[in-house]
Image (tube, rainbow, N blue to C red):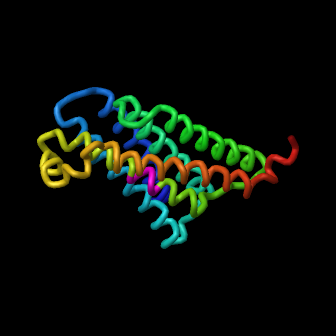
């Protein structure tokens, strides 16, 4: 297994640890969750970069990289909903898009095709990562390790409502638009309705 694929699998493991850390409250759990999520997000960038740079693109990577992204993003949004920071209906819309795209990939796979991630989907993932990190920084700013963030950047969090809602809106719009675009571009897979 090459390094990019190992990084993809590492992202899945980090996601499980991230969920466990946010589920079990303990001192500095939010700070640790932030660090774990940022490391997982970095693996998302690195696996694709290394695969393209060293021509290590595999069918496994084309399938598992976007799937690992979806698991990481969905876990982040579900946990933030659990912490009452993001409305549940937003997460339902995000999950619906992810299931739709995964379903299309399964249909394509059954026909012997692998559908790789697209540019708009990558923008969607980037904004979702930014949104989740914003809220994790907000949570961590109340803990000793990152308390300086609240002191220096407290205006960012003044009413998580303003910037947070803007980030949620951008993520949601890109999620819906990229999902519809993906569906439209691959509509031939559904021609046998």
Per the rendered image, the range of residues in magenta is 126-130
Q: Residue at x 49, y 62 (%)?
A: 48
Q: Residue at x 37, y 50 (%)?
A: 40
Q: Out of 55 and 89, give the one closest to the viewer.
A: 89
Residue 27 in sight from this viewpoint: yes
Measured as percent of width and height from the top left, residue 25 is found at 24, 27
Q: Out of 22 and 77, give the one closest to the viewer.
A: 77
Q: Residue at x 54, y 34 (%)?
A: 92
Q: Out of 113 and 77, give the one closest to the viewer.
A: 77
Q: Is residue 86 left or right of residue 158?
A: right
Q: Quadrant of the C terminus?
A: top right
Measured as percent of width and height from the top left, residue 173 is found at 54, 51
Q: Tell me: residue 174, above or below residue 13.
A: below
Measured as percent of width and height from the top left, residue 137 is found at 26, 47
Quadrant assignment, res 94: top right
Quadrant assignment, res 13: top left
Measured as percent of width and height from the top left, residue 133 is found at 34, 49
Q: Check if residue 56 falls in the magenta segment.
A: no
Magenta-drawn stretch, dominant element (helix, strand or loop): helix
Q: Out of 155 and 22, give the one closest to the viewer.
A: 155
In this rendering, the count of numbered labels is 0
Instruction: List the single residue furthest toward the top.
Output: 24
Residue 10 in sight from this viewpoint: no
Instruction: List the single residue furthest toward the bottom.
Output: 53
Q: Residue at x 60, y 61 (%)?
A: 118
């Amino acid at each position: 297994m090459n390094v990019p694929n190992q990084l993809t699998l590492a992202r899945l493991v980090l996601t499980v640890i991230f969920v466990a850390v946010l589920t079990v409250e303990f001192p500095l759990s939010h700070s640790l969750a932030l660090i774990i999520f940022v490391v997982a997000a970095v693996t998302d960038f690195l696996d694709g970069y290394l695969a393209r740079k060293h021509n290590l693109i595999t069918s496994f990577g084309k399938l598992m990289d976007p799937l690992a992204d979806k698991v990481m993003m969905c876990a982040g949004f579900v946990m933030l909903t659990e912490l009452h920071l993001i409305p549940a209906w937003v997460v339902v819309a995000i999950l619906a898009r992810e299931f739709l795209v995964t379903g299309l990939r399964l249909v394509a796979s059954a026909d012997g095709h692998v559908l790789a991630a697209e540019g708009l989907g990558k923008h969607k993932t980037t904004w979702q990562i930014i949104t989740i990190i914003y809220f994790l920084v907000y949570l961590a700013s109340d803990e000793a390790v990152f308390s300086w963030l609240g002191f220096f950047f407290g205006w960012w969090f003044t009413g998580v409502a303003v910037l947070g809602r803007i980030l949620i809106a951008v993520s949601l719009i890109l999620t819906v638009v990229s999902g519809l675009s993906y569906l439209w571009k691959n509509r031939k897979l559904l021609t046998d309705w």
